[in-house]
Image (tube, rainbow, N blue to C red):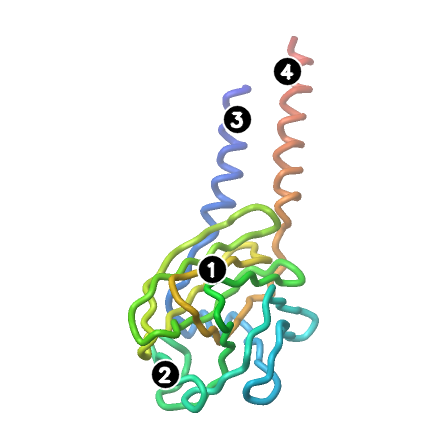
Amino acid sequence: MRSKLVAALALCVSSTIAGAQQITSPTAEYLASTTLFSIPGQEFSSLNTLTSGSLTLTFNIFGGKRIVPSSWLTWSSAPESERPAGANMDVLFFGDATKVSMQLSRPVSIFGFEAESNQLSEQNFNAYFYNGDVQVGSFSRTVNGNAGARLFAFQGGIDRVEFNGTDKFAAAFFRYGDVSVPEPSSVLLTVSGLAGLAFVRRRRRA
């Protein structure tokens, strides 16, 4: 009985982890299931928060608004980016920083953004997705500053992203899927409850 319960607990945890997955292309399904954070203000304005409805995205450092192609030279286009070919678009340039922390005001089911390096060459970037203190996933991509922006998106309970790379960068097209997801503490409470049930049953059998 105990071995069966342990197996059930393992299945519960692994299925939660298995439900998370990376998204590397802005497909029609991804765009339809997410909402875009707009980047407000004038060109060169500085900001560290974006708002969409009741959801707020906060950066640990300020980013400066730039516009492609006037104050930020290049960006990708479909299928690597949601930017229509040749269209103007807003980005956030994080100055001399090579890393940034992004905090959502509540967990969401999907969160993603596109990023492009400052140098017109290939650079490596890493994205780590969290729900509370629990890392739900991570992945790395090579990004080219010469019209080589790439999407970093993840599906799973997410309220924070740690992003870093080998170069300065700009980011754009911040998107979220606003579906209710459990906090990590809820999963832990469920596991603890099942473990407690096993202990009680074991004592009764004894």
Residue under numbered circle 3: 6
Q: From this view, report whether residue 198 is shown above or below residue 175.
A: above
Amino acid tagged 2 = Thr
Q: Is residue 159 left or right of residue 67?
A: right
What x and y, as percent, mark residue 169?
43, 71
Which-is-in-front pick, marks 4 and 2? Answer: 2
Q: Are marks 4 and 2 in contact (CB under 8 Å)?
A: no
- Locate residue 57: give its quadrant: bottom right
Amino acid type, label 3: Val
| Residue occupying the point 55% across, 26% down | 5
Whether pointer 1 and pointer 3 mark residues with C-beta atoms closer than 8 Å, the reply is no
Can you tell which mark lies on residue 123? none
Asked if labels 1 and 2 touch by Cβ distance under 8 angstroms, the answer is no
Instruction: Give the CA distance from mark 1 to mark 4.
Output: 40 Å
* Of callouts 2 and 3, the N-terminal one: 3
Q: Is residue 116 left or right of residue 2?
A: left
Label 1 sits on a secondary structure element that is strand
Residue 137 is situated, as x and y percent measured from the top left of the image, at: 46, 51
Contact flag, marks 2 and 3 (Cβ < 8 Å): no
Secondary structure at badge 3 equals helix
Amino acid under disc 1: Phe
Locate the C terminus and report the quarter of the image it occupies. Answer: top right
Q: Count of labels shown?
A: 4
Tag shown at residue 74: 2
How far apart in space, not on screen, are marks 2 and 1 (Cα)?
A: 25 Å
Residue at far front of view:
96
Question: At 32% across and 64% down in the image, what residue appears?
Answer: 142
